[in-house]
Amino acid sequence: MSSLALRTLYKRPATSLRPLQALVAQRGVSGTRLNNKPSLSHQTDSSMSSVLPPPSPPKMSFQDIFAASQGEHQGVWKNLWDKGTYHYWDRGQASPSLVDFLRDHPDLFQPSETPLTALVPGCGRGHDVNLFADLGMQAYGLELAASATDIAREFSETIAPPPAPGSRSYITGDFFSNEWLNRLDTKQFDLVYDYTFMVALDPAKGLRELWAERVAGLIKPGGTLICLEFPLYKAYDLPGPPWAIRSETYVGLLESVGFERVHHEKPRRYLPAGKDTDMISAWRRT
């Protein structure tokens, strides 16, 4: 899709293409923030303790589940998806911060005679994948667990298909492996979107540096990386995922592998988890 075509897309009347704001509104309500500590769902009156059973022990928090895995985080992600326990992170819609950013910056997308390709690592149920496909891109969502890609495909069947030439595909694979990439016709993408994926990688294992190198290899020269920077509010001594990060961390990681930051701004709208704290940035692959 050319830059001109993208600008035209945003200017079309609602009768020819659903506005981006309408797409967000149609795709459900926001989810909840990843809490560091669980809350008790009920309490038992001590005067009735002889009648009622004792309260159930509190469930493990999201962070405690990962801490108990002793570093085997891939197994935790697969287990949560296999059990359908994705309420921790699913927000029910594409981020309105991303929706606004795409509308405000059509200059990010290079002219092309063929549809642009977009990749969303850790795509979840595919809300962002569906958004890129609705903009006429060939959008791919990547997830580690087969159950996750099944859930994304099933969800995509409940919404309208994207307008031509847009398409959406869901792939199972390890982000750091080439196995899934070898199954695709494209080996590099015009656009990669990162939100809660990089910060779900344990920084103590050096995975952020590996992420930066990998994403640089996945984006075509002149292509774009969009990062919704989260959780900027979080203290570094709190457990993850998501692990705390700051905007300067993105700069250090991405400039070292050949990216130039071309936009960095505060969103007008947010999902509840990062309200008033998230930043969004765009990086050009040199």
Image (cartoon, grey):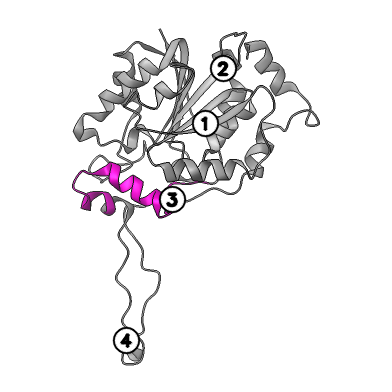
Q: Earlier in the sequence, mark 4 or mark 3?
A: 4
Q: How far is mark 3 from mark 1, CA to CA?
A: 26 Å
Q: Nearer the viewer, residue 22 or 115?
A: 115
Instruction: Please name the residue that numbered disc 4 is placed on.
Output: 46
In front: mark 4 or mark 3? 3
Find numbered disc 3 in the image and state the secondary structure of the residue it sits on.
loop
Q: Nearer the viewer, mark 4 or mark 2?
A: 2
User: Is 80 colored magenta in this rendering?
Assistant: yes
The boundaries of the magenta stretch are 65-91
Q: Is residue 134 left or right of residue 76?
A: right
Q: Residue at x 36, y 52 (%)?
A: 35
Q: CA distance from mark 2 to mark 1?
A: 24 Å
The answer to whether marks 2 and 1 mark residues whose Cβ atoms lie closer than 8 Å is no
**Amino acid bearing label 2:** Leu
Task: Report if the CB atoms under discs 4 and 2 are less than 8 Å apart.
Answer: no
Does residue 221 lie above or below 53 as drawn?
A: above
**Residue tagged by mark 1?**
267
Report the Cα–Cα distance between label 4 and label 2. Answer: 63 Å
Q: Sequence-wise, which precedes: disc 4 or disc 1?
A: 4
Q: What is the three-letter code of the residue carrying label 1?
A: Pro
Of mark 4 and mark 2, the one earlier in the sequence is: 4
Answer left or right for 43 relative to 107.
left
Query: What residue is shown with label 2?
Result: 116
Q: Which element carries disc 1, helix, strand or loop? A: loop
- Is 135 displayed left or right of 144 in the figure? right
Q: Position of residue 124 (x, y in %)?
A: 46, 41
Closer to the chain start, of discs 2 and 1, is: 2
SS for callout 4: helix
Residue 168 placement: quadrant: top right
Label 2 vs label 1, nearer the camera: 2
Q: Which residue is mark 3?
A: 86
What element does badge 2 sit on? loop
